[in-house]
Image (cartoon, grey):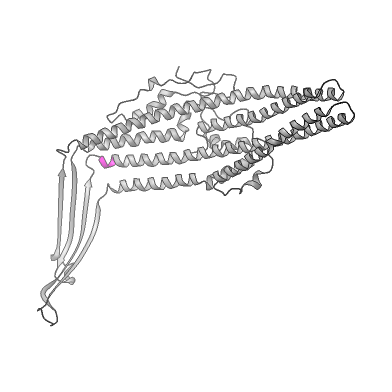
């Protein structure tokens, strides 16, 4: 059985990755050049589990706008704004234009160049005194010509260079898609951080309200002589401790709003009016809308970009090897020489020439050989980068799947803990009012409830972030359709 990544069969998520097949792709591309091959057989995949849904095709349409499954209109609007205005995305687009122009430059080298030349000469002589200068007979001459030169791609060296430039362009295009994927994930995770801080602030304000009610009851009991001033001071102390956390949460909210504005290419504070309104943490659906087949990593832009890097390096290695072969240069000219401008285009003044030259390296002190060695080493490096990218992809997917599973388990436990803690806090308050327990038990039961509620908020955010990380690890956020 090939290496796999999977969760247990009773979970809604499973994936299946054939590592050797993925790693063999660049080796096939580079097989035509002299390379030290990287064996895919020694690449160990993660521990495999029971695979399910492995035969399903990857739903790239769902991956393209995975954030819509979080059902949060504000998040959808933020990501749309970021795609339009983000400086990182606009820079990546500019790099595509640059790479396209470089490919055009290489393509132009396959064709002849034509130059037009024209000249006119006028000669005069004088007698050395102050008399006017007079023109000599035959002092005029005119010339026009069209000159052509062409370095014939005799053995395909220039074609290999063009292939490398095309691969560079494809790699830059994949880098752009990678920037889009990363931007969508970063905006989503920052948005989750914002909603988490706002949820924690709301929870803290509710905690202050509860502590305030406890303080009122304690003061009433003190006035009635049932309790001492020590109980009142203890409640006041815990209330102020809770209040001290509010400025930090408000600071986090403001800074996170500014970070979202930066990601969207806007000035600080530009999004505050849209983001100040309370909203819960977006919750990922319980089941993914996609299958995870063996070819899933080919959806990732960074894997595709690394593969294009291997293609470019292999083509440059081939071009370096072709330097050993002869090169053919052709040049020609057609023009006219005349003593009078009116006779420039007379048939008897037209002359043409054609020159061809074949050159081959004989001795270059090892320059070509060393250049081949350089390109060969760079190709091996590209292969290693591809291998590293694939292994990183496997790790990211595996970690995201594990995080989704474990946070789901933790949320189930926390739900039960909150239910029990809430009942305990209510019972402790009732018994305290009846004089059956002391104040410390009330404060401890309330502290336990507040702590578990905070853990629930934090874990909910962690689970949503785990889903975001999984979609990012699968290359979600773009489509080549």
In the image, what residue occupies the spot 22% across and 34% down?
A: 369
Q: Is residue 464 above or below residue 114?
A: above
Q: In the image as oriented, which residue stretches furthest toward the bottom?
A: 131
Instruction: Name the foreground residue: 369 vs 104.
Output: 369
- Left or right? Give the position of 108 relative to 361: right
Q: Quadrant of residue 146?
A: bottom left
> In the rendered structure, does residue 290 fall within the stretch colored magenta?
no
Residue 433 percent coordinates (x, y): 86, 25
Q: Quadrant of the N terminus?
A: top left
Residue 164 percent coordinates (x, y): 33, 39
In the image, what residue occupies the spot 56% across and 23% down?
A: 402
Instruction: Name the foreground residue: 336 vs 157.
Output: 157
- Left or right? Give the position of 211 relative to 184: right
Instruction: Name the foreground residue: 248 vs 385.
Output: 248
Residue 469 visible at all:
yes
Q: Is residue 214 above or below residue 2?
A: below
Q: Is residue 259 above or below residue 403?
A: below
Residue 306 percent coordinates (x, y): 40, 34
Q: Quadrant of residue 388?
A: top left
* Highlighted range, magenta: 153-159
- Left or right? Give the position of 481 relative to 377: right
In the image, what residue occupies the spot 45% across and 31% down?
A: 298
């Amino acid at each position: 059985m090939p290496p796999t990544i999977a969760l247990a069969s009773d979970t809604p998520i499973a994936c299946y990755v054939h590592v050797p097949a993925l790693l063999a792709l660049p080796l096939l591309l580079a097989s035509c050049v002299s390379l030290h091959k990287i064996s895919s057989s020694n690449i160990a995949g993660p521990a495999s589990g029971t695979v399910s849904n492995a035969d399903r095709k990857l739903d790239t349409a769902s991956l393209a706008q995975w954030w819509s499954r979080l059902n949060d209109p504000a998040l959808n609007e933020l990501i749309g704004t970021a795609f339009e205005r983000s400086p990182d995305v606009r820079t990546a687009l500019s790099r595509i234009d640059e790479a396209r122009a470089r490919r055009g430059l290489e393509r132009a080298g396959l064709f002849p160049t034509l130059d037009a030349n024209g000249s006119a000469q006028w000669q005069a002589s004088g007698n050395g005194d102050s008399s006017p200068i007079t023109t000599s007979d035959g002092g005029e001459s005119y010339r026009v010509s069209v000159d052509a030169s062409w370095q014939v791609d005799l053995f395909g060296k220039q074609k290999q260079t063009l292939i490398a430039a095309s691969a560079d362009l494809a790699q830059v295009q994949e880098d752009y898609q990678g920037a889009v994927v990363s931007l969508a994930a970063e905006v989503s995770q920052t948005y989750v951080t914002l909603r988490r801080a706002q949820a924690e602030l709301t929870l803290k304000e509710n905690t202050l309200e509860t502590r305030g009610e406890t303080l009122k009851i304690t003061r009433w009991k003190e006035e009635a002589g049932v309790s001492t001033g020590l109980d009142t001071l203890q409640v006041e102390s815990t209330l102020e401790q809770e209040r001290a956390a509010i400025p930090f949460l408000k600071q986090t909210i403001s800074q996170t709003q500014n970070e979202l504005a930066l990601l969207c290419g806007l000035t600080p504070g530009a999004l505050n009016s849209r983001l100040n309104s309370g909203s819960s943490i977006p919750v990922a659906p319980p089941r993914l809308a996609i299958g995870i087949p063996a070819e899933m990593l080919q959806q990732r832009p960074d894997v595709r970009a690394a593969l294009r890097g291997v293609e470019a390096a292999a083509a440059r290695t081939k071009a370096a090897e072709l330097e050993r072969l002869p090169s053919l240069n052709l040049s020609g000219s057609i023009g006219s020489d005349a003593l009078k401008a009116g006779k420039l285009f007379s048939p008897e003044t037209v002359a043409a020439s054609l020159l061809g030259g074949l050159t081959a390296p004989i001795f270059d002190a090892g320059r070509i050989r060393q250049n081949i060695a350089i390109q060969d080493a760079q190709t091996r490096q590209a292969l290693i980068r591809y291998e590293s990218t694939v292994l990183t992809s496997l790790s990211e997917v595996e970690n995201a799947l594990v995080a989704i599973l474990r946070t789901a388990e933790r949320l189930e436990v926390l739900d039960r803990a909150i239910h029990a803690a809430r009942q305990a806090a209510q019972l402790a308050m009732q018994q305290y009012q009846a004089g059956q327990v002391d104040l410390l038990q009330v404060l401890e039961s309330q502290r336990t409830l507040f702590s578990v509620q905070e853990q629930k908020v934090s874990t909910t955010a962690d689970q949503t972030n785990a889903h975001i990380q999984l979609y990012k690890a699968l290359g979600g956020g773009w489509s080549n359709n």
